[in-house]
Image (cartoon, rainbow, N blue to C red):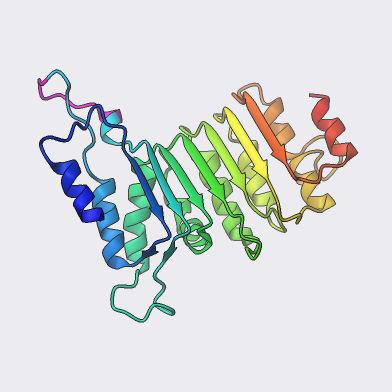
Amino acid sequence: KLESFRRSCSSPSFDRWNNRVLLHLDGSMINSDVLYQLVKVLNLPLAKDPTGKGRRSKKMDRRWISVTIEDSELADPEEYMEDNYVTSSDTHVLYTAIADRALHLKIIRSDQFLRDWLDRGVTYKLMMETLHIEQTDEDTEVLSSEQYAGLGDMIAGAVHLRELDLCLPFGEGSDKLFDGLANAVNLQELSLYDNYRYWDEETQAELFVGGDGRGTGALLQLLRNPQNQLKKLRLSKLGMDGQNLIALSEL
């Protein structure tokens, strides 16, 4: 299907300028064959000059309107006993293409894919405007401190990122993620949702009042920063207590 789609997009009749192309991978085992077909699709030139003068729009050429990885996982060599499992060099090619060419990225219930991306993705400069990460499986474990830190570093360094939606278990080590949020001044919309109830007083404090109780938490730092561009803030199922609510309401 990916190869057929790629050929359709490559045909002379495909209007790359007017079509808003979405790529949604749902319930897939991403082995080596699938991965490289996916990379070919992501690297397709999606722009042509509507005037017919041969000029190209760099912005349109490097952007897919949306890339979604849902209920999908990578073919791990320890579990996938065929020759076309994916290696670290394979995933490097895929993550580079996603980071460079996705305008909106969604990773939904793809825990293994997310963890591998975070383990390796800190070196990639995200060009996207929207990042949505949703882990709603009740069996999902909290991320490691290194994975939280990797996500925080990517968010802080993503200067084009305007909308961030995180539905994650925020457990021990999530303060490393919050450090990145404190510096994400380009965000215009931020949503934090935790249905796992991993929140303890210390985790809440890292986001709101801070360890010293003086309003030095990451979110309050962001909101107090005069350069912050935040227009919409959504907080859901974070178990906020009175102290944190008061600190937030006083801004």
Given residues 173 and 242, the one toward you in this image is 242
Query: Residue 202: where, in percent of width, then height?
Result: 81, 51
Relative vertical location of residue 211 with respect to residue 233 in this rendering, above or below:
below
Query: Residue 179: where, in percent of width, then height?
Result: 65, 44
Q: Quadrant of residue 145?
A: bottom right
Query: In the image, is 249 to the left or to the right of 38?
Result: right
Query: In the image, is 27 to the left or to the right of 21?
Result: right
Query: In the image, is 155 to the left or to the right of 74?
Result: right
- Quadrant showing the C terminus: top right
Relative vertical location of residue 211 with respect to residue 92 in this rendering, above or below:
above
Given residues 159 and 27, the one toward you in this image is 27
Query: Residue 108: where, in percent of width, then height?
Result: 51, 52
58 magenta-colored = yes
- Residue lying at the far top of the rendered structure: 51
Q: Quadrant of residue 240?
A: top right
Residue at image point 65% right, 37% down: 182
Residue at image point 84% right, 32% down: 247
Query: Residue 128: where, in percent of width, then height?
Result: 43, 37
Q: Magenta residues?
A: 52-59
Residue at image point 35% right, 69% down: 87
Main structural element of the magenta stretch: helix, strand or loop? Answer: loop
109 magenta-colored = no
- Quadrant showing the N terminus: bottom left
